Amino acid sequence: MALGETGLDYDRGFSPREDQLANLRRHLRLAADCNKPAILHCRSKPGQRDAQDDLLRELADAGAPPAVLHSFSGPVDYAETALNMGLAISFSGLVFRGGEEASADVARLTPADRLLVETDSPYLSPPGAPGRRNEPRFVEITARWLAEQRGDDPGALGTQLVANYGRIFSRPPS
C-alpha cells in the first residue's frame, strides 16, 4: 500500500539530522523502486522551517516520488511546492493547535483529489474528542473542519476522501 511513516523531525531531535536525512533518502528510493507512495512526517521547531526545506530538497533530488505529507504542518509555500511536485496532503487533529493556522489556507488551496484526513492515533486528538487518546472515529471532526475551510458539503467531501484514499493507496473499490 505505502512506505512509511518516514521523514524528518527536527522538533524533538531524537536522532541526528544527518542520520534522518540518510534514512529518508533510503526510504524515498525504496518507495520509488516499489512504486508505492511514501508517507512523510515533517516537523521543525516552532517558528522554523528547516525540516520542511530539507524535505523539499530531498524530494526534488529523488525525482519527486509519489508521497503524502502526513499530518500536515508548515507554511503555505511549503505546501504549494509539495503540491507542485504532485504530493497529497493529509490533515489531522494537529490543525486545531496554536501555531498551525496556515493549515486552513493549505486546506483551501489543496486540490480536492489530493486531500486526505487522518487521526494519527493515538496522538493529536481534535477538540470534542473525549479524553486525550485519539481514535479513528474522531477523524470525522477533522473532516468536518476541512469541509468548513473549503466551503464543501461534508458528505461530498467524505466521498472524495474515500476515493482519494483508494486511488493514492491503490485499493480496489469495495
Image: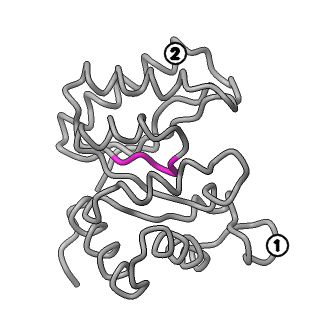
Q: Split into 4 quadrants, where in the image is the C terminus?
A: bottom left
Residue in view at x 49 percent, y 68 percent? 149
Quarter of the image holding residue 65? top left
What is the magenta segment's predominant secondary structure?
loop
Q: Is residue 104 above or below residue 141?
A: above
Q: Where does the image place residue 147, in percent across and percent down from the top left?
A: 45, 75
| Residues rendered magenta in the picture | 68-72
Q: Nearer the viewer, residue 10 or 80?
A: 80
> Taking 37 as reference, is 18 left or right?
right
Q: Which mark is residue 131?
A: 1
- Position of residue 123 measured from the top left corner of the image (x, y, whole percent): 68, 57
Q: Residue at x 29, y 76 (%)?
A: 160
Q: Quadrant of residue 129?
A: bottom right
Magenta stretch: residue 99 in it? no
Amino acid found under the numbered disc labelled 2: Asp
Name the one closer to the observer, 53 or 133.
Answer: 53
